[in-house]
Amino acid sequence: MPMRLIAPLWGLAGVFFLLGFAVYRLTPKAIEAIGMGLTTWQWMVLALWTLFMGVAEGYRGFQKRFSPRTAARARYLRDQPSPARAILAPFFCMGYFHASRRVQITSISLTAAIIAIIVLVSFCSQPWRGIIDFGVVVGLTWGIVSLAGFAWKALSGTDFKHAPETP
């Protein structure tokens, strides 16, 4: 019984920590850029980039794909726990293992791409780095909120229509 409670909570906590830590790390650079006083051109880029990241990352990436699948995988942990999945619950919830081949490839590819982008953006100077970070913070925050909503539905309801995409 404890594993049925602890595993999904540990899995979701790990994912929330990862996303929250990214928001925590990026927010100061975004605020710094805005505090520098942006030109009209930079404000336009900030607005368009933020809109793009809200739609592409927040809505399409998180709300439509990642969050429902992650919540469904946490529910799967609750309903079918195993010691290995429980110990590695955050990685399980993100789809790194015991997932369809498509989900595993997507998870690993996205992780590699995100790491590459983080390295590249670190070479940008302010205010451009902060402008990029601002859009990312908006997308990640949307992701955190959508994941919280889907997780609540998955773990508190009797019916959850999203698939965990396990083999």
Image: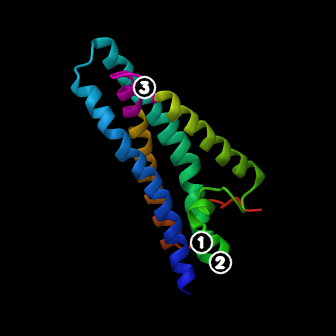
Position of the C terminus by quadrant: bottom right
Mark 3 to mark 1: distance in Å? 38 Å
Q: Secondary structure at mark 3?
A: helix
What type is the residue that disc 1 sits on? Answer: Ile
Position of the N terminus by quadrant: bottom right
Q: Residues within 10 Å of mark 1 (few under 14, many from 20)?
A: some
- Residue 43 location (% of width, % of height): 31, 19
Q: Is residue 108 left or right of residue 66?
A: right
Q: Secondary structure at mark 2?
A: helix
Of callouts 3 and 1, the N-terminal one: 3
Residue sitting at x 47%, y 41%: 58
Q: Nearer the viewer, mark 2 or mark 3?
A: 2
What range of the chain is rendered magenta?
Answer: 122-134
85 up-or-down from 147: above or below:
below
Residue sitting at x 50%, y 57%: 15
What type is the residue that disc 2 sits on? Answer: Pro
Q: Is residue 113 left or right of residue 38?
A: right
What type is the residue that disc 3 sits on? Answer: Trp
Mark 1 to mark 2: distance in Å? 6 Å
Q: Are marks 1 and 2 in contact (CB under 8 Å)?
A: yes
Name the residue tied to disc 2.
83
Residue sitting at x 40%, y 52%: 20
Residue sitting at x 72%, y 59%: 99
Q: Which mark is residue 87?
A: 1
Name the residue tied to disc 3.
49
Image label count:
3
140 up-or-down from 117: above or below:
below
